[in-house]
């Protein structure tokens, strides 16, 4: 089924297009593949990036929108990504980057297109585990900038995934959230009597 990619805010897209058109921004980026790319570079597949700050005792995740990420395509492949962030003046370009999450995101999106259900793709970052997942939200009409993972949504950990969590294997939120909760929750301090 096709994915229903949420529309990015127009100012976020404009800021990425402006950065791509700036020789200084591209030259100073730490993205050799973008600097050496042949042909025009175009921003595609805008995905809202949500951050899971914590999981409360009831197992409910506290997430917040951190920005929008665009895959930068040259020819038939993504060579980099561009992140935008919300500032007091509105959406602004943040930075270009490359690395394993670019190809991993593309792979996960292709996997998601083969699923029987239509989803709205988002990214969910779990900083406490240095983990990034493709979050497949079941409500395709929802505002991509809002909401929390529903129990029936899918999370697809991107590679590299934390030890013990398989990359590119879809998990129901209801199944993966307890694992994440266990890993994020600090172990109690053991105090031994003197």
Image (tube, helix red, strand yellow):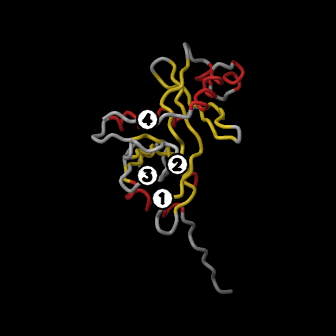
Residue underneath mark 4:
5
Q: Do the residues bearing badges 3 and 2 touch, measured as CB atoms within 8 Å?
A: yes
Q: Where in the figure is residue 35, as x and y percent of width and height?
A: 63, 20
Relative to residue 178, is residue 27 drawn left or right?
right
Q: Residue at x 47, y 68 (%)?
A: 58
What distance separates the C-alpha of mark 1 from that of mark 2?
A: 10 Å
Q: Do the residues bearing badges 4 and 3 touch, measured as CB atoms within 8 Å?
A: no
Q: Secondary structure at mark 3?
A: loop
What distance separates the C-alpha of mark 3 from that of mark 2?
A: 10 Å
Q: Where in the figure is residue 140, as x and y percent of width and height?
A: 39, 42
Query: Can you tell which quarter of the image residue 85 is in?
Result: top right
User: Which is more toward the observer, 116 or 8?
Assistant: 8
Nearer the N terminus, badge 1 or badge 4?
A: 4
Residue underneath mark 1:
180
Q: Where in the figure is residue 1, as x and y percent of width and height?
A: 30, 35
Query: Can you tell which quarter of the image residue 179 is in?
Result: bottom left
Relative to residue 115, is residue 6 drawn left or right?
right
Q: Judge the density around disc 1: few (<14), some (14-19), many (≥20) Cα neighbours within 10 Å.
A: some
Say which mark, if any, is on residue 165.
3
Nearer the N terminus, badge 2 or badge 4?
A: 4
What distance separates the C-alpha of mark 1 from that of mark 3?
A: 10 Å
What distance separates the C-alpha of mark 2 from that of mark 4?
A: 22 Å
Say which mark, if any, is on residue 131.
2
What distance separates the C-alpha of mark 4 from that of mark 3?
A: 26 Å
Q: Secondary structure at mark 2?
A: strand
Front position among marks 2 and 4: 4
Farthest residue, direction top: 39
Farthest residue, direction bottom: 194
Quadrant including the C terminus: bottom right
Q: Residue at x 43, y 35 (%)?
A: 5
């Amino acid at each position: 089924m096709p994915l229903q990619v949420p529309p990015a805010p127009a100012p976020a897209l404009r800021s990425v297009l402006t950065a791509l058109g700036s020789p200084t921004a591209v030259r100073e980026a730490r993205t050799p593949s973008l600097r050496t790319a042949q042909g025009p570079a175009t921003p595609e597949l805008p995905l809202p990036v949500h951050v899971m700050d914590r999981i409360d005792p009831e197992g409910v995740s506290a997430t917040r929108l951190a920005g929008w990420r665009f895959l930068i395509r040259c020819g038939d492949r993504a060579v980099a990504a561009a992140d935008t962030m919300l500032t007091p003046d509105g959406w602004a370009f943040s930075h270009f980057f490359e690395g394993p999450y670019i190809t991993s995101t593309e792979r996960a999106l292709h996997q998601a297109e083969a699923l029987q259900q239509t989803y709205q793709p988002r990214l969910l970052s779990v900083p406490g585990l240095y983990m990034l997942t493709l979050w497949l939200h079941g409500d395709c009409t929802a505002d991509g900038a809002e909401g929390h993972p529903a129990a029936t949504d899918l999370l697809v950990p991107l590679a590299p995934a934390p030890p013990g969590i398989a990359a590119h294997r879809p998990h129901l939120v209801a199944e993966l959230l307890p694992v994440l909760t266990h890993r994020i929750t600090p172990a109690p301090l053991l105090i031994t009597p003197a």
